[in-house]
């Protein structure tokens, strides 16, 4: 019989593989589109999502989260949630239509209005897949979830490139996005096995909303946090600056977007299943912290040391201005994953209010910093605001998880030592290798050798880190190997 731990590990593996493949597809797609479309096109698309993401806050009212967290909930709750979510989806599509002209006026770009209206269709299409997706998550059926998401990425890539070649403007991105989410909604409904019944229970709706109201509040705070930079930068510096900042932030935030988010998706239903035993929750949290730092600290070093070679190889010389931003984001990546790994603990243990309050404090701190520092230092100032915020808020997050689960802070810091020491070793090895390459300028400065240089430096860093980690924490290294290759021993 497959245990909860094995289901969790298997789910993480499937989502991790899916995220890696999606990221490869995304990077490859952007590498092609960056040579066809102007930076301002990506900035315009990102600005449209400031409105879309804001409206999306109300797409489920947190009801899907309630389905996942509540134990022994009747099937009627799923049908109740479906009708509420579908009604909300239709309403939000109309709100998009009415709000669009005002957003265009705010940013002094009337094309934004048409884009937002077109994207409003996504609400209706994806509304059909919300409850089936929540059911799959509650059952930890992440293999199917991953396959559906991967198909969506492939569809998006295909149509984005085709449309860009035919119509090299922002509408190529809009059309691909609408098609992607329509396909994913259909597949979620078809393969989940969920079958709608005409049942509605007001009492169950109130019970689900009792948990979901905090998730709704958290969604609002997360929206403000994730879009505040784009709003401020777009207003002060313009659409092109938003395009540069968005790309830099996506690269710098890779571990959070792909790995930390993946772990959170898996651990939320896992923590919910064992929420009555806080000691087990604490042990699981500490192990998650160790594994995520095993990835995030070396990635931070790579951002700081290899960003120039990466940008030249993937995006070309006209994107070189984002290199300093990526290097600074390495300091965000050093601690940000720890902050985000606390969220599934709060939610799984029935304390979403902690998550809401902590993220609210983060927003109240970051927004004034972004405004002031962006005006003073441009895009670099916006990144400095992120660094200051995450380094202040993360210790508070650790303390709150400690309060819920009871682990000792000494145990927590022990999880960080192996990755920290091995990352320092990796940093030294990359700097030495780069020094040797610089000593041979005919190789280092060759115009078409960026890929070769990046490959050499990345290989040196990766091999050094892997070998040093094996000697520093052999037990964890073997456990990671088992998680990847041997589910029975995981």
Image: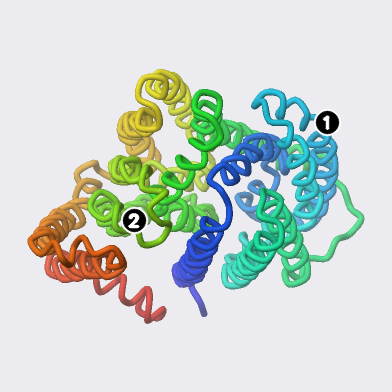
The local crowd at label 1, few if under 14, some if 14 to 19, many if 20 or more residues have their Cα within 10 Å, is some
The residue sitting at 45% across, 20% down in the picture is: 371
Q: Which residue is mark 1?
A: 98
Q: Is residue 129 visible in this depiction of the protein?
A: yes
Pick whichever of labels 1 and 2 is earlier in the sequence: 1
Q: Is residue 446 left or right of residue 70?
A: left
Q: Image quarter for residue 384?
A: top left
SS of the residue under disc 1: helix
Quick one: 137 or 1, which is closer to the camera?
A: 137
Of the numbered discs in the image, which one, if any, rests on residue 292?
A: 2
Instruction: Judge whether 82 appears above or below 346 on screen.
Output: below
Q: Position of residue 388 (x, y in %)?
A: 32, 29
Question: Closer to us: mark 1 or mark 2?
Answer: 1
Q: Nearer the viewer, residue 401 or 162?
A: 162
In the rendered image, residue 291, in percent from the top left (x then y), is placed at 31, 59
Vertical placement of residue 18 versus 387, above or below: below
């Amino acid at each position: 019989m497959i245990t909860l731990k094995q289901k969790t590990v298997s789910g993480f593996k499937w989502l991790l593989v899916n995220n890696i493949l999606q990221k490869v597809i995304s990077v490859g797609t952007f590498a092609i589109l960056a040579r066809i479309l102007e930076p301002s096109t990506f900035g315009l698309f990102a600005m449209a999502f400031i409105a879309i993401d804001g409206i999306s806050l109300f797409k489920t009212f947190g009801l899907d989260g309630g389905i996942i967290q509540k134990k022994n909930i009747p099937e009627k709750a799923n049908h109740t949630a479906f009708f509420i979510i579908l009604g909300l989806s239709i309403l939000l599509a109309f709100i998009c239509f009415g709000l669009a002209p005002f957003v265009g006026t705010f940013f002094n770009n009337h094309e934004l209005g048409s884009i937002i209206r077109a994207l409003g269709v996504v609400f209706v299409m994806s509304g059909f897949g919300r409850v089936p997706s929540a059911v799959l998550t509650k059952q930890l059926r992440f293999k199917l979830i991953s396959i559906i998401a991967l198909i969506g990425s492939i569809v998006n890539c295909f149509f984005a490139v085709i449309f860009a070649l035919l119509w090299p403007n922002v509408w190529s991105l809009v059309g691909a996005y609408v098609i992607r989410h329509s396909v994913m909604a259909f597949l979620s409904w078809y393969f989940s096995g969920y079958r709608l019944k005409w049942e509605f229970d007001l009492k169950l709706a109130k019970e689900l909303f009792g948990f979901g109201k905090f998730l709704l509040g958290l969604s609002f705070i997360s929206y403000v946090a994730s879009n505040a930079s784009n709003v401020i930068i777009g207003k002060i510096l313009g659409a092109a600056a938003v395009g540069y900042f968005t790309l830099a932030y996506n690269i710098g935030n890779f571990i959070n977007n792909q790995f930390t988010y993946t772990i959170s998706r898996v651990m939320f239903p896992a923590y919910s299943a064992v929420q009555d035993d806080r000691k087990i929750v604490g042990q699981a949290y500490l192990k998650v912290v160790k594994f995520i730092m095993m990835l995030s600290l070396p990635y931070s070093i790579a951002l700081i040391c290899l960003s120039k070679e990466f940008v030249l190889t993937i995006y070309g010389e006209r994107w070189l201005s984002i290199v300093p931003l990526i290097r600074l984001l390495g300091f965000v990546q050093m601690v940000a994953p720890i902050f985000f790994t606390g969220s599934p603990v709060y939610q799984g243990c029935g304390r979403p209010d902690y998550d809401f309050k902590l993220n609210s404090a983060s927003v109240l701190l970051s927004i004034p910093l972004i405004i002031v520092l962006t005006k003073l230092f441009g895009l670099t100032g916006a990144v400095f605001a992120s660094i200051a915020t995450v380094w202040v808020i993360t210790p508070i997050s650790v303390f709150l998880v400690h309060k819920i689960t009871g682990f000792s802070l000494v145990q927590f810091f022990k999880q960080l030592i192996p990755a920290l020491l091995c990352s320092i070793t990796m940093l030294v090895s990359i700097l030495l290798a780069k020094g040797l390459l610089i000593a041979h300028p005919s190789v280092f400065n060759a115009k078409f050798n960026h890929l070769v240089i990046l490959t050499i430096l990345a290989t040196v860093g990766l091999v050094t880190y892997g070998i040093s980690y094996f000697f520093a924490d052999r037990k964890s290294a073997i456990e990671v190997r088992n998680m990847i290759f041997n589910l029975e021993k995981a």
